[in-house]
Amino acid sequence: MAIEVGQQVPDFSMKGNGGKEVKLGDYRGKYVVLYFYPKDMTPGCTTQACDFRDQHESFKDVNAVILGVSPDPLERHEKFINKHDLPFELIADEDHELAEAFGVWKLKKNFGKEYMGIERSTFIIDPEGKLVKEWRKVKVKGHVEEALEYLREHK
């Protein structure tokens, strides 16, 4: 059963940039923008990451941190971070444990092939650790601004 809006998000601990542990509990007192994306270095995912990068200071202004999650390994995340100068954590969810907890590990179809992968989604967790907003099947264009606007209205 996926975590739903209104529920407390279990305190997860996953590997992030540089191999350090990223724990949800470390961000208590801040909003967490947890965004799931399919793959580093792909066009849509790069656009989305760069949109979050470009608005990073604005998210800080509303007491929010950004955490990106994909099934890519840490080494690929490091290349993605360095290539696009990303100022936030990317989490390696290689076993898709976190993606499954949020219900975003889905059967996908592309060019007639079926496979399991991430459904692009964003979740906002409030400063007490409760899920307060979700966007599923996200379209990249304009999404980062929409998430930022939500936080501006609800902080």
Image (cartoon, rainbow, N blue to C red):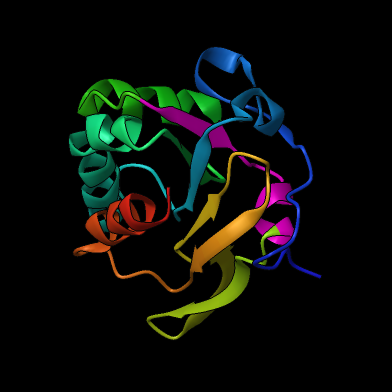
Numbered disc total: 0
Nearest the eye: 45 or 3: 3
Nearest the eye: 79 or 125: 125
In the picture, residue 62 is in which quadrant?
Answer: top left
Residue pictured at 44% horizontal, 54% vertical: 37
Residue pictured at 33% horizontal, 30% vertical: 60
Measuring from the top left, give residue 40's x and y in whole percent. Answer: 38, 43
In this picture, residue 74 sits left or right of residue 146? right
Q: Is-magenta flag for residue 91?
A: yes
Measuring from the top left, give residue 14's x and y in whole percent. Answer: 68, 31
In this picture, residue 16 sits left or right of residue 86? right
Nearest the eye: 113 or 9: 9
Q: Is residue 141 above or below residue 16?
A: below
Q: Is residue 93 above or below residue 147?
A: above
Residue pictured at 74% horizontal, 37% vertical: 12
Residue range of the region highlighted in magenta in the rendering: 88-101
In the picture, residue 100 is in which quadrant?
Answer: bottom right
Nearest the eye: 29 or 73: 29
In this picture, residue 99 sits left or right of residue 85? right
Q: Is-magenta flag for residue 105?
A: no
Measuring from the top left, give residue 84's x and y in whole percent. Answer: 22, 29
Measuring from the top left, give residue 3's x and y in whole percent. Answer: 73, 63
- Image quadrant occupied by the N terminus: bottom right
